[in-house]
Image (cartoon, rainbow, N blue to C red):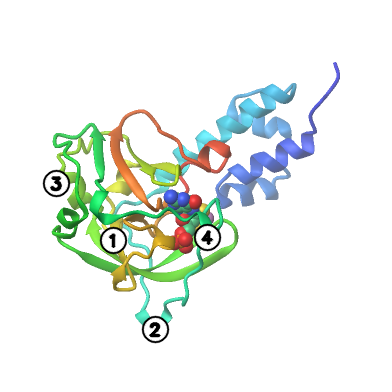
Amino acid sequence: MKKDFDKAIVIQEALKELPSSARRLFMKRAVTLGGLSLLSGCAVTDKDSAERMLRKISTLNDDFQAWLFDPNKLAPTYPESMITRPVPFNAFYDRDEIPEIDESDFLLEVSGLVADKHSWPLQELYQLPQTDQVTRHICVEGWSAIGKWGGVTFSTFLKRIGADLTAKYVGFKCEDDYYTSIDMPTALHAQTLLAFTYDGRILPPEYGYPMKLRMPTKLGYKNPKHIAAIFVTNTNPGGYWEDKGYNWFGGI
Ligand SMILES: Nc1nc2c(c(=O)[nH]1)N[C@H]1C(S)=C(S)[C@@H](COP(=O)(O)O)O[C@H]1N2
Ligand SMILES: [Mo]
């Protein structure tokens, strides 16, 4: 049989999928494809089965991170003097494509497993109890920045719309065709914020006007900017980068 895949690459890719603790363990024990097959329950004989194994390991990683996630553990916060100025801009496009959104015709859509599906004008969202946080944003592209975001604690919002808090996922659709989704325990975490301000001012266009979900417990790509719609569901909605192979849980 012609082998059209490279074992070394399969191992390398599989290791990237593992949380760093598991990766270190595997490094110490000199990983073999046999070992990874055992872990994932998938035998690797060709390119397709290699991909199946990588997907399985990625799911194992999500399950492992979900299991490790402590809903009561707070991410570090920082003094305002440590805020990174300016905070870097990042999106899957350049600055000239930042969505332009007009407050007067903006409505936040809410759907799925929620009792109250009415759409929210910004002024109504601004009436909800507001709080702020100075936390670190970490991007997988290799930079991090400390910023100050303000808004309503997301659990307060979810309760206000009568969300089914036993559902598995909350999904987000953005004005720029970005999308992502998170697990319910993270959605209910005390530092998960539906943010309307950055550094005390209305969120500037490049940082996600009119709102972003700010989670210091998750990597940058899990923090959707320009949110247009929020839905609660038991079917994993995936995400823009997640569907291209980034880890779905995306914990820090
Ligand atoms: N709508 C939308 N949200 C997004 C992105 C995007 O391209 N579009 N990029 C993500 C990534 S990879 C990062 S690192 C952060 C960047 O946020 P910032 O521009 O406020 O630093 O936004 C995240 N949320
Ligand atoms: Mo990112």
Q: Is residue 10 left or right of residue 244?
A: right
Is disc 1 placed on a helix, strand or loop?
strand
Q: Is residue 116 left or right of residue 148?
A: left
Residue at 14%, 46% (x, y): give it: 160
Is disc 3 placed on a helix, strand or loop?
helix
Q: Which of the two labelled residues, at mark 4 and mark 1, occupies the earlier sequence position?
A: 4
Q: Is residue 221 visible?
A: no
Q: Which of the two labelled residues, at mark 4 and mark 2, occupies the earlier sequence position?
A: 2
81 and 124: which one is in front? 124
Q: CA–CA distance between discs 1 and 3? A: 17 Å
Q: Which of the two labelled residues, at mark 3 and mark 2, occupies the earlier sequence position?
A: 2
Which residue type does callout 3 highlight?
Arg
* Label ID, residue 160: 3
Crowding at dot 1, Cα within 10 Å, few <14 / some 14-19 / many 20+, comes out as: many
- The residue where tag 1 is placed is 196
Crowding at dot 3, Cα within 10 Å, few <14 / some 14-19 / many 20+, comes out as: few
- The residue where tag 2 is placed is 81
- The residue where tag 4 is placed is 95
Which residue type does callout 1 highlight?
Phe
